[in-house]
Image (cartoon, rainbow, N blue to C red):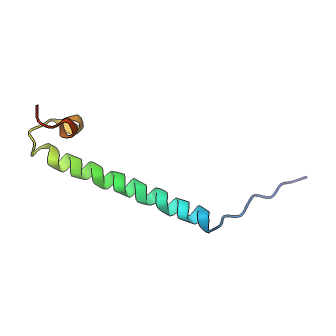
Amino acid sequence: MVAQKPKSNIYTALLGVAAIALLIGCLLLAIEISRYAGDAGSSGWFGAIRGPV
């Protein structure tokens, strides 16, 4: 007996779109953090989150 693979539906497609949107949002957030890290006089990622020392 061979089981058939379940077909994709609209919810599977929406899940994929949401995952891609989250990845793009994380990428844009990383770009924003790296842009403002130099303005605060901090060093790197964690310095941008903690603020100037």
The spot of residue 10 in percent (x, y) is 61, 68
Q: Residue at x 22, y 39 (%)?
A: 49
Q: Residue at x 19, y 37 (%)?
A: 44
Horizontally, residue 17 falls left or right of residue 32, namely right
Q: Residue furthest bottom?
A: 10
Q: Residue at x 16, y 43 (%)?
A: 37
The spot of residue 29 in percent (x, y) is 29, 52
Asked if 32 appears above or below 7 in the picture, the reply is above
The spot of residue 6 in percent (x, y) is 74, 60
Q: How many numbered callouts?
A: 0
The image quadrant of residue 50 is top left
Asked if 28 appears above or below 9 in the picture, the reply is above
Q: Residue at x 28, y 48 (%)?
A: 30
Asked if 18 appears above or below 30 in the picture, the reply is below
Give the position of the C terminus as an image quadrant: top left
Horizontally, residue 36 falls left or right of residue 12, namely left
Asked if 23 appears above or below 44 in the picture, the reply is below
Q: Residue furthest top?
A: 53
The image quadrant of residue 24 is bottom left
Horizontally, residue 12 falls left or right of residue 37, namely right
44 or 10: nearer the viewer:
10
